[in-house]
């Protein structure tokens, strides 16, 4: 959200939800918070699970990896829902190896969280630029998961 605010995109609303139910109501994982706070992020919410209702509330649904895409698309009720789903990696600067998943480093050491944040921040920069330049639909057309 900080990068959106820095870009003057104050009208963009962001929510987060996992595709599994085993963390509902819990704060982010300890190493997620530790590395995130080191980078200046705040953690003010608890985990929720993605539901079919999220399609109606969102213009864009960003999935971190292929497994998340599969779980999200199972809940899609129509082609319009499916068309909103794209992996976060589609906004990354380097596609030389294709669209990369953002790995879930849960259970790995701190350096895995550093690498995840590096990858995620690069993709967020690309997403912010795509929003500013009006290219989000173009990225979804090229790389959307529900095509």
Image (tube, rainbow, N blue to C red):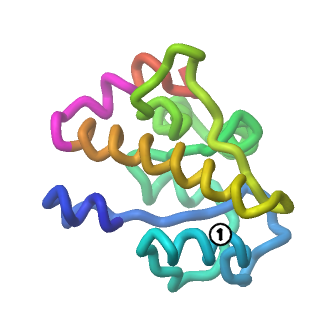
Q: Quadrant of residue 139?
A: top left
Considering the numbered disc 1 on the image, is that residue within a helix, a strand or a loop? Answer: helix
Q: Report the side of 66 relative to 87 (left or right).
A: right
Image point 43% across, 54% down: which residue? 58
Look at the image and say whether residue 39 sits in the magenta stretch. no
Residue 4, percent across and down? 27, 59
Residue 56, percent across and down? 47, 55
* Quadrant of the snapshot with the C terminus: top right
Q: Quadrant of residue 142?
A: top left
Local crowd size for mark 1, using a 10 Å CA cut-off: few (<14), some (14–19), many (≥20): many
Number of numbered discs visible in the structure rendering: 1
Q: Which residue is mark 1?
A: 32
Determine whether 24 is above or below 81 in the image: below
Q: Report the side of 31 relative to 12 (left or right).
A: right
Residue 55, percent across and down? 52, 51
Residue 122, percent across and down? 42, 42
Relative depth, front residue between 4 and 13: 4
Image point 48% across, 66% down: which residue? 15
Q: Quadrant of residue 36?
A: bottom right
Q: Residue furthest front?
A: 111
Q: Report the side of 108 relative to 117 (left or right).
A: right
Determine whether 38 is above or below 113 in the image: below
Image point 40% across, 63% down: which residue? 14
Relative depth, front residue between 25 and 97: 97
Start-end of magenta stretch: 132-139
């Amino acid at each position: 959200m900080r990068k959106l605010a820095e870009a003057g995109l104050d009208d963009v609303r962001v929510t987060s939800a996992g595709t599994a139910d085993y963390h509902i109501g819990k704060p982010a994982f300890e190493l997620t918070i530790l590395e995130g706070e080191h980078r200046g992020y705040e953690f003010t919410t608890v985990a929720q699970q993605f539901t079919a209702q999220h399609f109606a509330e969102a213009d864009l649904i960003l999935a971190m990896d292929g497994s998340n895409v599969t779980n999200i698309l199972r809940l899609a009720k129509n082609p319009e829902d499916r068309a909103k789903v794209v992996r976060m990696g589609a906004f990354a600067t380097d596609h030389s190896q294709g669209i990369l998943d953002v790995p879930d480093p849960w259970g790995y050491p701190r350096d895995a969280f550093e690498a995840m944040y590096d990858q995620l921040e690069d993709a967020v920069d690309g997403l912010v630029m795509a929003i500013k330049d009006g290219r989000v639909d173009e990225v979804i057309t090229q790389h959307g998961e529900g095509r």
